[in-house]
Amino acid sequence: MILILQNNSGNTQTIPAGATMTLNYSVPVLLAPSVPAGVTASFSGNTVNIAFPQDFAAPARTGLGFDTQLNLQGLADGTPVSVSISVSPSALSFTGQGNATVLAFVDGPSCTAPTLPPVTADDLSASCPLADEIAAINADLNSGCQCRRTGANQSSYSL
């Protein structure tokens, strides 16, 4: 799931050193998001913690994205997935900060393993050589012909 924090102002906005952001998802997190240089991210359970150990300048009209991999397995099709965002220090604010913002809906087909068609013995035997072809191969092998390696790395054989 991609969460984008957008600086809609006409000016560079600075997230101050020491600021932290906590993202509490309604489903388990599989992998913390990749973050820009100088920013760190960690996760446990449904929570991602993002730390800004140094000032982070967000240019005007740009977004800071957090692509977090979530575990959607087992959720019914149409289940809402949400995130609650909290930040510290409290003077730092983002539009949309708070709870129960629906970000996405689970798409059933994307969360299930594909069903492979059954394979029968007839399907397999259709790709096998015919008995007379096998007999011809065996005859060639038993005729005492000499095989030699060929190819650039000697990985092929020729009669």
Image: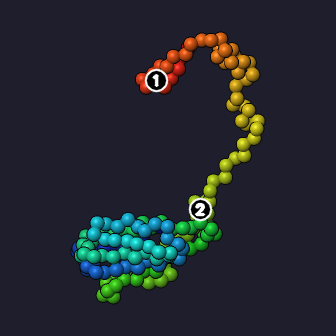
Q: Is residue 133 visible?
A: no
Q: Is residue 55 above or below residue 159?
A: below
Mark sitting earlier along the chain (2/1): 2
Q: Residue at x 67, y 18 (%)?
A: 137
Q: Residues within 10 Å of mark 2 (few under 14, many from 20)?
A: some
Secondary structure of the residue carrying numbered label 1: loop
Quarter of the image where one finds residue 41: bottom left
What colour scheme governs how the chains and residues are painted in the rendered image of this protein?
Answer: rainbow
Quarter of the image where one finds residue 133: top right
Residue extending furthest toward the bottom = 90
Specify the amino acid type for callout 2: Cys
Residue labelled with disc 2: 111
Q: Is residue 56 visible?
A: yes
Give percent across and percent down for residue 16.
Answer: 25, 80
Q: Residue at x 61, y 69 (%)?
A: 75
Residue 144's tag is: none
Q: Is residue 95 left or right of residue 16?
A: right
Front-lying residue, 145 or 120: 145
Residue labelled with disc 1: 154
The C terminus lies in quadrant: top right
Give percent across and percent down for residue 76.
Answer: 64, 69
Mark 2 and 1 residues: CB-CB less than 8 Å, in contact?
no
Give percent across and percent down for residue 111.
Answer: 59, 62
Q: Is residue 18 left or right of residue 123?
A: left
Q: Nearer the viewer, mark 2 or mark 1?
A: 1
Front-lying residue, 107 or 159: 159
Quarter of the image where one finds residue 49: bottom left
Give percent across and percent down for residue 129.
Answer: 70, 25
Specify the amino acid type for callout 1: Gln
Front-lying residue, 153 or 73: 153
